[in-house]
Amino acid sequence: MNRYASLADDYFVNMNLNTEMQLPSARETVLEFFGRVQKAFPSMRNFYTRENGDFVLEEDKDHAHHRWMSIEPRRICSGCVNPDSVDEALAQHQLALQLAPYMLSVSPLDCEALDFMMGFDFSYRGNHDELVAEALGVGTAMEGLLDIPGASILNFEPSLTISLEDDCRRQARLMIETRTNAYQVRRNEFPEDQISVYFTVRQYGSLPHDASYEDTLKELRQDCEQLLNEHVIDQVLKPLAQAISTK
């Protein structure tokens, strides 16, 4: 089992390519693109169109490990849930980026932003926001609010974005998403649901003329894993897992 799989109940590795121009939506173009993807990953055989017009190709979701890919009006997305390794997920994302210039007419000039994201889901039955505040702290400036008699935490979803370069074109973002609402807190009844931690490294803007999407994604992956290992696993993921285990 790889290191990331042991940190949470589920983990996933995603890629998003946001484009400046609309992506092709013609039947032949979309089917040829996904047909090429399916040739590389034969178990991705579930193809459908969402109500909003997005096109999706995916594996069966009833397996803990599954792949998916989608084409939206201005975004190509690729995701792998519980891969055996990050390399396995990267191969899928790289295929999408290799095909995009030739089959979807996406050039390096057309890049609005390219994301490499690693996410972690923790199953928990209880007040998610209260647990996150307990595990990570709220900071001295806000601690006093928690001492108000009868106060209950209804929303606490820490988020931080930092620049990794002077021109701010490469950024990293840590975001925590909770799924507890006021109705559940009022009734003190909580279904088991996921607390999600997302860590994304994003490259903004058009790529240099001699750059490629594949090489840029490799750089984003390297930055993402380095920062995750140095600043997120011990500081965020492990405290959340420990707090849940004590409940």
Image (cartoon, grey):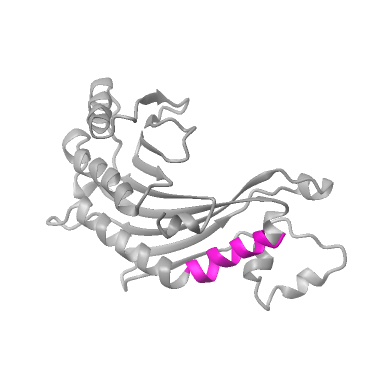
Measured from the top left, where is residue 86 in percent x and y? 34, 53
State the residue at coordinates (62%, 64%). Answer: 242
Horizontal arrangement in the rendering, residue 175 relative to residue 141 (left or right):
left
Above or below, 7 against 49 in this view is: below
Measured from the top left, where is residue 216 in percent x and y? 24, 57
Question: Which image quarter holds the N terminus?
Answer: bottom left
Magenta range is 232-247
Q: Is residue 235 magenta?
A: yes
Q: How many marks?
A: 0
The secondary structure making up most of the magenta span is: helix
Above or below, 15 against 72 in this view is: below
Q: Nearer the viewer, residue 158 or 232?
A: 232
Quadrant in the picture for residue 215: bottom left
Horizontal arrangement in the rendering, residue 31 relative to residue 80 (left or right):
left
State the residue at coordinates (39%, 32%). Answer: 59
Above or below, 206 against 166 in this view is: above
Quadrant in the picture for residue 218: bottom left
Horizontal arrangement in the rendering, residue 33 relative to residue 43 (left or right):
left
Residue furthest to the top: 27
Residue furthest to the left: 210
Measured from the top left, where is residue 122 in percent x and y? 58, 53
Residue furthest to the bottom: 140
Above or below, 76 against 35 in this view is: below
Residue furthest to the front: 1
Measured from the top left, where is residue 81 in percent x and y? 43, 44
Question: Which image quarter holds the C terminus?
Answer: bottom right
Q: Is residue 28 magenta?
A: no
State the residue at coordinates (24%, 54%). Answer: 206
